[in-house]
Amino acid sequence: MTLEALNYVTAWPEIFLLAMACLVLVVDVFISDAKRDFSYFLSQLTLIGTFVLVMTVPVDGREIAFNGMFVQDSLSIVLKLFILALSFVTFVYSREYLKDRNIFKGEYYVLGLFAVLGMMLMVSANNLLMIYLGLELLSLCLYAMVAFNRDNGNASEAAMKYFVLGAIASGMLLYGMSILYGLSGSLMLSDIAVAITQADDSRIGMVFALVFILVALAFKLGAVPFHMWVPDVYQGSPTAVTVFIGTAPKLAGFAMIMRLLVEAMGELHTDWQQMLIILSILSMATGNIIAIAQTNIKRMLAYSTISHVGFILLGILVGTNEAYASAMFYTITYALMSLGAFGIIMLLARKGFEAENIDDFKGLNQRSPWFAFLMMVLMLSMAGVPPTVGFWAKLAVLNMVVQIDMVWLALVAVFFSIIGVFYYLRVIKVMYFDDVVDDQPLSCGRDIQITLSTNALLVLALGLYPAGLMSLCISVFA
Amino acid sequence: MFADWPLLSLTVWVPILGGIAVLLSGDKGDAAGVRRLALVIAVVTFILSLGLYTGFNSSTAEMQFVERHEWISAFNIYYHFGVDGISMPLIILTTFTMILTIIAGWEVIKKKPAQYMAAFLIMEGLMIGVFAALDSILFYVFWEGMLVPMFILIGVWGGERRVYATIKFFIYTFIGSVFMLVALIYMYYQGGSFAILDMHAMKLSMDEQLLIFIAFLMAFAVKVPMWPVHTWLPDAHVEAPTGGSVILAAIMLKIGGYGFLRFSLPITPDASHALDWLIITMSLVAVVYIGFVALVQKDMKKLVAYSSIAHMGFVTLGLFVVFQIWENPANTDGSGAILAVEGAMVQMISHGFISGAMFLMIGVLYDRMHTRNIQDYGGVVHTMPIFAAFAVFFSMANAGLPGTSGFVGEFMVIIASFHANFWYAFLAATTLILGAAYTLWMVKRVFYGEVANDNVRALKDLNQREFVIMSILAIAVLVMGLWPAPVVEVMHATIENLLQHIAVSKI
């Protein structure tokens, strides 16, 4: 076997990212704390470089590499670009936050880069083993990042919880995969798909494997009833890590669903559709209702994530290409909104003070009308109020649900989003209607201000003209 | 001169972009400049909207000033504007009222005037968008979008219980409208188009129509508001700043009525027919029961808010009584139907003027005394004679005195409902008594009698700014009352066409 047969050119971006992550790791050892910014810039450069490589990678429809382990198609390219962009912005937001807490260490960026690599592998996986490896690479980095502020009890607790539950989920996934392998005799997604179409008496076994895999997916995405880790991890982690967990990995999770449920087990659509309906309704209900009772904004956003996951599953369960596109649109826009919202939380935080309570937003309109406005846009977008992009995401998904004659499900979804409106409005309420409690001026660098403004204005701009992103998502599945 | 301009886009976007400009000019600088800028933008918008009137061809029911551009091709959504005889007068009402609202908040708003003015201007653009949109999703975007500035307006510049009131307002309206969204998506799934006019032409079975009708009813009944989903309105009105109350009463409530005309009746004519008893009952309950409720109010704003609900009952009554007019064997020519719908439209526009004036009036008193309790007043006529004259005039108009615009619409609807059923007309006509009772009793307690206390004794009469607003509104009310023909003429062709359309079953 020659090197050309590996078709390694297709995986250039991943190879580059891996090499650079190792370089950052080594370089970081030799620089003093005062020059730690160098690691940061090198990491950002890595992400930019990888971004450019992904853009230029020669792909002609669908490219297979490494003996079928790795696939590069339009889905993986688009998702990778978004993952890289989201991670880039996350790194921008987190620099000052980490500095203020004396945890501005190179490891954050190294772990982050490896997590990005894990996500990129998940997105490009064409083999069960690759999916598992990518997922584990991502998860292990995240476990470590959650405990990054190691002197903090909450963070350690969150990391422990995340690790234990995550490990159980990984076990479930492996178990499901092993059943699939036993029945189909292959780890390749395409072979499994063929085996399922030909399976008559082993179909029940396939469904059995599906259940395990679905449980693991629900765990990783945080769908009810496998959501227990989400609020604790979101709350316990340093916000710089929460924002990382809450954005790009959602895209990787979406890709994992696409690869496993659609590409490998598309034939079992009727089976997983029913399971997803239940998960989706439960997620929307639990997420939206419990979020009302939260006083901690990170916890509130965690429950809001759960409800948004319900909506994403709603798009997936429809099972048509257009519907996958709508779910992808939802996932991307959700990641964008949550990136902005956590960005604002970090903006409000400062040395020795975490702006974690909803009450810390009191009177933000008087302290900084501009950032209050941006937060309002983000909250309205999460609530799905036009003219923000959150509305179009909901519209796209609901549209698909109605197309398969499940109007009742669409009604359930809008019913729970009404409940959701309340807690998003409450954030706007404290920002605009309440008096200032904490009148310290907001201080943060120009880079954060500009990125944050672009981030939130993008949510508004995509709301005014969503057609571009929408057709991009549709073209991926065309 | 306006012929080649995209007039509708301009009337929508000039206030929105102007509002953003006002917002960016900020609250740190000089407040007078901000106010002047806001006023200029409102006046320019008004002038632009007059172009819609002068260029309007009232002999056709076709949509005019149509603009249509592709917006979101994936879902067949268009940026599609156009007006007919129903929406054009309402757009002008909006732009007109907005000028008065801006002037009304002139010196009164001390806290963040730029944000205040900007919220109003942006809301103006969104409301015009609601009236002008011919794509149902575009309509929905404006419809929901306008809640946000109102939410902020009540919440920031409102009274004591403003947070409760504004969240209630937002959630009530939101609940109603999301179900409408599902209905719209369903029709897109059936017909492949989000265009409102395509939905008018779409065939729908009775079951579908009933469900869609109920979804629309949830959205529009909350907005009108109809009994029994009216409870957000008194709260919102009482807590809102004067300008907010004016816009709520004068424009936002009309959007509910407009929704019935643009969506419910033409899209689901058979369901409207089958359920007209429900709407008529709800309307009559609003007219009679809410009239009594208004009678016992202690707070002036609340009283006017309830009177708004009662008056809007006429609008929904006029719109849905047409089926029974057609069915009545005694009525052969069917002329009553057009009278009913035109009466409803006239009532909407006239109520825009009168309720706006009533809230401005209360605002004038509130700015001086900082109380809205009827009890705290008495003998205001002795200290504010000019103001009292205006107040009595507008109260008479509110009570439906002939010669004022309040009379025309109510009278048309009452006459029309005679063609359907004597008792409808009888019950509706009680408003002439009830309306007179609650309004005039309030006037008596507030304006006449002995000077009640030292605060009233110290009152100063209208200043120039207030005088100008009041005079403009008084003229509008009089002109509409004495010579409503131009308004009716503009909408005649459209309403005739609409009635022909809904007379044909869709099943």
Image (cartoon, helix red, strand yellow):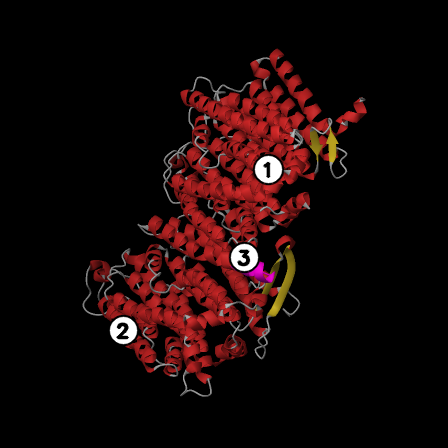
Per the model, the C-alpha gap separating discs 2 and 1 is 78 Å
**Which of disc 2 and disc 3 is earlier in sequence?**
3
Label 2 sits on a secondary structure element that is helix
Drawn side of residue B204 relative to residue A54, left or right: left
Quarter-wise, where is residue B455 in the image? bottom left
Drawn side of residue A87 relative to residue B346, left or right: right
Question: Would you say residue B478 sits in the magenta stretch?
Answer: no
Residue depicted at x 54% and y 79%: B493
Residue B58 in view of the camera? yes
Per the model, the C-alpha gap separating discs 1 and 3 is 41 Å
User: In the rendered image, which residue does mark 3 sit on?
Assistant: B185
Vertical relation: A431 (above or below) A178 = below
Boundaries of the magenta span: B184-194
Chain at numbered mark 3: B
Label 3 sits on a secondary structure element that is helix
Name the main secondary structure of what is drawn in magenta.
helix
> In the image, are marks 3 and 2 on the same chain?
yes
Residue A201, labelled with which disc?
A: 1
Quarter-wise, where is residue A268 in the image? top right
Q: Nearer the viewer, mark 1 or mark 3?
A: 1
Q: Residues within 10 Å of mark 3 (few under 14, many from 20)?
A: many
